[in-house]
Image (cartoon, rainbow, N blue to C red):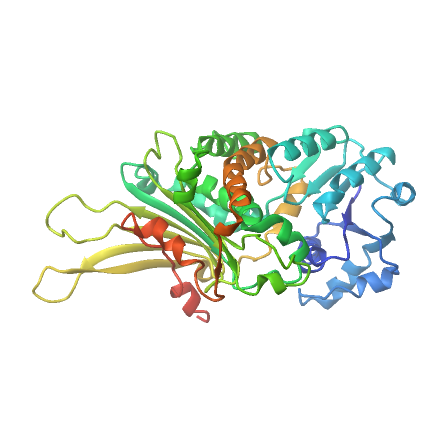
Amino acid sequence: MDNINIIIFGATGDLTKKKLIPALFEIFTNDEPVEIIGFARRELSDDEFKNSFSNTGGNNEKWQEFLSSIHYHKGSFEDLSAFQSLRGQLQTDNLLFYLAVDPGSYETIVKNLQQSNLNPPQSRIIIEKPFGEDKQSAIDLYQTITEVFSEEQIYIIDHYLGKETVQNILAFRFANGLFEHIWNSEAVDSIQITSSETIGTEGRGGYYDKAGAMKDMIQSHILQILAATCMEPPSSFEPRDLHIARKKLFNALRIVRDEDTIRDTVVFGQYEGYKTEEKVDPHSHTETFAALKTYIDTDRWSGVPIYLRTGKKLAVHATEVFITFKKMNHHLFPHQEGNILAFRIQPNEGISLKLFVKNPGKEMEVQDVSMDFCYRDSFTISDNSYIRLLQDAIKNDRSLFTSIDEIVASWEFVAPYLAFKENHPELVIPYPPDQWGPEGSNALVVNEDRTWLSLYPYKCDINLTI
């Protein structure tokens, strides 16, 4: 088979510089030959385009070899002749298109690919999130794309699925019978997922102000983490079986339409200073923080509350999952809390289990201790999840990419919350940076005798040099 040609639309953007080129260089150093063509509207020569990238891999000889495989093609996404010119330059049908562009350009690019005969059976297309702005727009967009590419050629990316620690939740569950047998409502008290950032929009105000925390994080990344944590065992790790298992989980999420119930189970916030960010509407009601409580209506998770929380300009940068087990039902230690199993997805990846042991001395008193596993102690893993995802796309493996059924179900879940926020913009509460969002978010858990959990700081944060 000919070397794969990877055509990146939006090649002068941050995603290409910060994630895609470093990932492709890593793939290239592992003896996977690639030819890369950057497609963008700027007036650049090949050398100017190559010089915009930095060598982060340390191997200068290999880097120079890698640069020789990179080329630039100037063109507007609306200009059909630019696509036709690209078609004339390609010497293979083994093509991978990456749409690192504003979602508003997806349809235009796809139609021009079709009209330029750039959709041979060997080709694939990777599409970034957000996929649509709601359920119907996602369906419409998918229909447009499937008029040009078959389902097997379409790779809808959620880079969290490429993270080793998200994949490891599945391995942890299904390879350790000790835990899978208690992974249910009989033993589990509650589940929390927090994805917090300390940064603001970082120059992405134009996109973020249209999206907000619910669309940007919960509808995609956080629900995928929830699926890995709570879905039923798939029949295999083949793409179809994984897609089916995740879809079933999303379809089981409780959809709340009653406004009074929504009011009691969701909190929106916006960090102070957001409205002065570049490209942000000074009258914006976009939420930069969202927290909610929901349920999964299956036999396994019946009655177990699920707490989801995400936001920008918060106290800590971390993505974490907490499984809190029920308290022991006996009188020997009446005030003992439940055990907690925690996964740190990023940064400083690890797993922590809170146990109770006896305090030294004659009294039978216990205190909590933690058993911690830090990935870096045993493995070398990259924080660039695009490496694995691009490798899989090159090899035609769709396991870690999302299906349209998953996307539709996730939009159905968040739709009532988004509608509620639009109807009640006054409920997007300001909060000071470097804290944990609006005070009202604490009520979601405190009113049920729980608290928001955080690993930070723990062993994997502290012992950075061993």
Task: Depth check: give the residue in front, 139 or 395.
Answer: 139
In the rendered structure, the answer to whether residue 16 lies left or right of residue 300 reads right
Residue 206: image x %, image y %? 68, 55
Q: Looking at this view, name the residue that lies furthest to the left.
A: 362
In the rendered structure, the answer to whether residue 99 lies left or right of residue 138 reads right
Number of marks drawn: 0
Q: Residue at x 63, y 59 (%)?
A: 282
Residue 293: image x %, image y %? 40, 44
- The quadrant in which the C terminus is found is bottom left
- The quadrant in which the N terminus is found is top right
Residue 407: image x %, image y %? 58, 36
Q: Residue at x 38, y 65 (%)?
A: 459
- Using the rendered image of the protein, determine whether residue 384 is visible from the camera's viewpoint: yes
Task: Depth check: give the residue in front, 27 or 23.
Answer: 23
In the rendered structure, the answer to whether residue 420 lies left or right of residue 389 reads left
Q: Residue at x 68, y 30 (%)?
A: 151
Residue 11: image x %, image y %? 77, 54
Task: Depth check: give the residue in front, 278 or 298.
Answer: 278
